[in-house]
């Protein structure tokens, strides 16, 4: 039989590595999403330029955004670790989702204005709402732990 201390020596480092892989995956998705949005801000102002679309399927993009949001929701809900490391993760995730919310609102207001009935505009709005929800979840979790 394998003892529990040996299992902890292998499982705990793998959990930490998996957490950071998840973070960098979400970070890359957010950076790519925002780069396309900021490129659209620049490209729409030029003559004969069409905005860049995310994918050919709105439903696929929506499922990706909602899937990542759901995974991050459960990750944040069951966030574990010692106190300092847990707070560090809360701050890093909070900054990431807060900046994404701000970026989506700015890009949406510049490119689409109040006319977001375009598929990419709706996706941008949903992404901003998911990021805002996750930011609020992190803030509420942080505040409840402070009491």
Image (cartoon, rainbow, N blue to C red):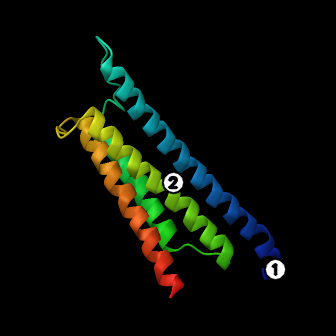
Which image quadrant is residue 106 in? top left
In this picture, is 81 found above or below 118? below
Of all residues shown, which one is farthest toward the bottom? Answer: 147
* Secondary structure of the residue carrying numbered label 1: helix
**Secondary structure at numbered mark 2:** helix
Q: Residue at x 50, y 61 (%)?
A: 94
Task: Tell me the distance, in whole angstroms, between the alpha carbons under discs 2 and 1.
Answer: 35 Å
- Picture quadrant of residue 43: top left
| Residue highlighted by disc 2 | 96
Residue 50 in sight in this render: yes
Residue 55 image offset from top left, x and y in percent? 35, 32
Return the residue at label 1. Answer: 5
- Residue in the foreground of this view, choosing between 11 and 62: 62
Residue at 60%, 49% (x, y): give it: 24
Residue 98 horizontal side relative to residue 105, left or right: right
- Residue 58 seen by the camera: no
- 62 relative position to 134: left or right: left
How many circles with numbers are drawn on the protein? 2
Asked whether, in this view, residue 73 is left or right of residue 20, the answer is left
Q: Residue at x 43, y 49 (%)?
A: 100
**Mark number displayed over residue 135:** none
The residue shown at (47%, 79%) is: 143
């Amino acid at each position: 039989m394998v003892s529990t201390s040996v299992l902890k020596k292998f499982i705990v480092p793998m959990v930490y590595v998996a957490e950071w892989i998840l973070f960098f995956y979400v970070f890359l998705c957010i950076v790519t999403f925002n780069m396309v949005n900021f490129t659209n801000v620049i490209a729409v102002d030029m003559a004969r330029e069409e905005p860049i679309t995310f994918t050919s399927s709105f439903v696929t993009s929506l499922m990706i955004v909602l899937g990542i949001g759901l995974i991050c929701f459960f990750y944040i809900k069951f966030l574990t670790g010692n106190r300092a490391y847990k707070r560090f993760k809360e701050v890093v995730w909070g900054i990431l989702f807060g900046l994404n919310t701000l970026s989506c609102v700015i890009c949406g207001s510049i490119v689409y204005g109040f006319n977001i009935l375009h598929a990419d505009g709706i996706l941008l709005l949903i992404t901003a709402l998911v990021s805002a929800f996750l930011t609020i979840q992190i803030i509420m979790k942080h505040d409840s732990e402070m009491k």
